[in-house]
Amino acid sequence: MNRSSGRRMPGDLPAEATSFVGRRHELAQVAEVLTRARLVTLTGPGGVGKTRTAVRAAHELRTSFEAGVQLVELSALRDPELLANTVAAALDLPEQAARPAIEVIADYLEDKDLLLLLDTCEHLVDACAMLCDELLRAAPRLRIVATSRQPLDVAGEHVLAIGPLSVPELYPGAAGQDCDALALFEDRASAAVPGFTVSDDNRADVLALCRRLDGIPLAIELAVSRLRVLSLDEMLTRLDDRFRLLTGGRRTSVPRHQTLRTAIGWSHDLSTEPERLLWARLSVFAGELSLQAAESVCADDDVLPVDDVLTSLIGLVEKSVVVRVETPEGTRYRMLDTIREFGLEQLASLGGEERTRQRHLAYFLDVARSFDEEWTGDSQIPLLRALVRDQANVRVALEHCVASPRLHCKGLEMATALWGYWHTTGLLTEGRYWLRRTLDGCRDETPVRVKALYLTSWYMDIQGERGNNEDLLKEAERIATHISDRNGAAWTLAFQAHRRYFLGRMEGCAADFEEARTRMTALGDETGLRMLGFYGGFMLIISGDHEKGIAWCDDSLARGAAYPAEQWARSWALWVKSVGLWLRGDHDASVECSREGIRSKAALHDLMGLAHFAEGLAWHAAQLRHFERVAVLQGAADALWRRAAKEARFGIPALHELHDRAAGQARAALGADGYHDSFVEGGQLPLEVVVDLALDDETAAAPDVPPQRSGPADGLTPRERQVAALVSEGLTNREIAAKLVVSKRTIDSHVEHILTKLGFTSRSQIAALHTGPGSESFVPSSEV
């Protein structure tokens, strides 16, 4: 799954690429204030180190919160309407439920002891304030640390101003000890110029430079990069010259924001002309970018040929203007917000912003088109990972389309081409958001509009908004007929049947799926046929035609066999087939399908899909009388459902019946409390543990639960009687765990409860019950 792929998931704290210097007082303040305030906002000007301080504080505090720490990076977000969606993504909450994202987040956080870090709020300050206010009301154990250039102005907010690093005043004999600014300069300088150290010979010059830059970390890092070509004396002289120009030669203090702008401007002036042009053009990007994107968007035939982009980019990295980011997908680059803002100003003054944004849109529209053509093949996972990293730039491109009437249709094409991305990553709400906005702006009757209409209807079905999407499908059908869009007509027909069976209106669905299949076969639409295999197959299976439904799934799997690395269509076909096999009575074959499919869902980090498979494996656990495993798997599945969907098991009665039957058997064996405890345990398991648990081999039936009889153990639950009987047989806790297919920790807990209830102090006393008075309580029995 994605977490095991090496890719940092949204919400994870980033590793610190450079050493953290100073800020001990500020870090102690954050920790102390969080003990008495639930919202702490770190304020200060750009470049002062708010984000680094907040992230370091989060690293140090993460063990203090049961549910850990989650980071939400907002610098690349421009549309406040997507704020809640961005927070949901950081919390790993797919948008597969139609409820407003803020409600989903509030419900998820309601009982969580969690620290939420909202980074860079100033451009979304009103939206962030409303979000914080609502979440703090809904989740009493939640703490929030925000970074912003201004307070959020929320009730209960505690503001901590993050100032520049300390720089002592110079006086004869000053040593500059305990100076954070000097420590930062030395740390970064030793990395930029191997062998550099602060000594008695240069300490005064370093302190003077740091003081001239007001101790602002970003300004210091930009200055350090010049050590490769300038001496400290030369740097001081040139920097003083810039300040004299700024102040008209008067030796007056300069506001700190002007100090930073001066330092940035100084780096800009000392850059080559191609570097300055690249700096300006790179500023249209949001978040990270690849070298290929930089070359495509920023190069031209005159001033900045494509062959010069890499050279100029390396120069900007060396000057600390651009940050290099190493990722599992390769080297990428990003700009800090303050530097990007300066670049945008330069781009506007050059008069090239619109042309650069057009090239940015063209590049990411091509990315979307290529994705649409290739994502159902073997390159599916790499393509999805690349798009996740490019999400901020995709949003910027779509926003540019929505803001420009003449680009609305390009926006519609882009939003539609990304349909597989929206679905597979669980971003259905965001997908619908862009489809709606671009459908409203582009009214052209084209195959793209047909596709956008039936995709929107499909997403509504999945999110549980059923009954009000019929008009979308009617319009899609009308346009497809009018423009002779045979492919669009076939897909529309399939989703009309899909909509009806999700409403429980099965009449005519099988015939429509058959007709859609015939049309897609004639058109050679392999993607459509693979999808119909599991969507139509599911409808057939829940209608009682298990054989035909399984055959449709097999057809889908056979068509996808040429792409063994494709996971999305394959995993859904395997899940539907597993349900069909189970209902047909082929339980072992059903479990094999589930084991194969759950690996694919884990690779996609598909929470809804994992919930489906966990449910099915719970049915099998019940058959083997692994009742604690039933409860744990059902608890895990329930937690995933609550994160991923509006209603568990799609609201399908047949699936509810299978769930209830397994749960009833488990409750009877474990007792209501025992089932509840294991159910809760399952809901708290990390996702990777849920996957490992589901994949555990479980072939042998569990031992019977001894019946309750009068004796010293009559206060034990059914599961505790079972564990006590196995203890009496001389099994260790680890051996009992293996026999019952549960964790050793669970058995440790059971043994502790048994000792407490019976007033015993050792396992030998439990074993003695087997041969002593009342030992009949532990005689094995087939009664359950």
Image (cartoon, rainbow, N blue to C red):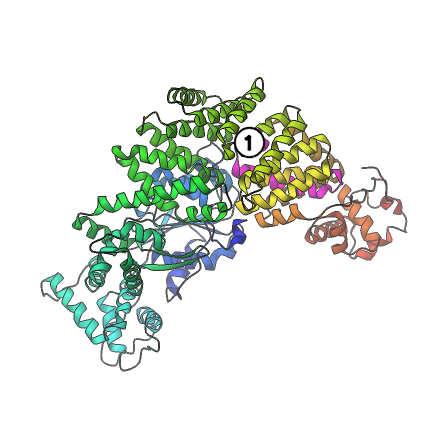
Q: Is residue 330 above or below residue 536?
A: below
Tell me how many marks there are.
Answer: 1
Residue occupying the point 49% across, 33% down: 97
Using the image as rendered, state which of residue 668 and residue 690 is in the foreground. Answer: 690
Q: Position of residue 514 (x, y in %)?
A: 56, 23
Q: Position of residue 303 (x, y in %)?
A: 20, 56
Q: Is residue 389 above or below residue 572?
A: below
In reply to whether residue 781 is colored magenta, the answer given is no
Dot 1 falls on a residue whose secondary structure is loop
Q: Residue furthest top?
A: 507
Q: Main secondary structure of the magenta part?
A: helix
Residue occupying the point 37% across, 28% down: 449
Q: Residues within 10 Å of mark 1 (few under 14, many from 20)?
A: some
Residue 106 appears in the picture as rendered? no
Amino acid of disc 1: Glu
The part of the chain drawn in magenta is 622-651
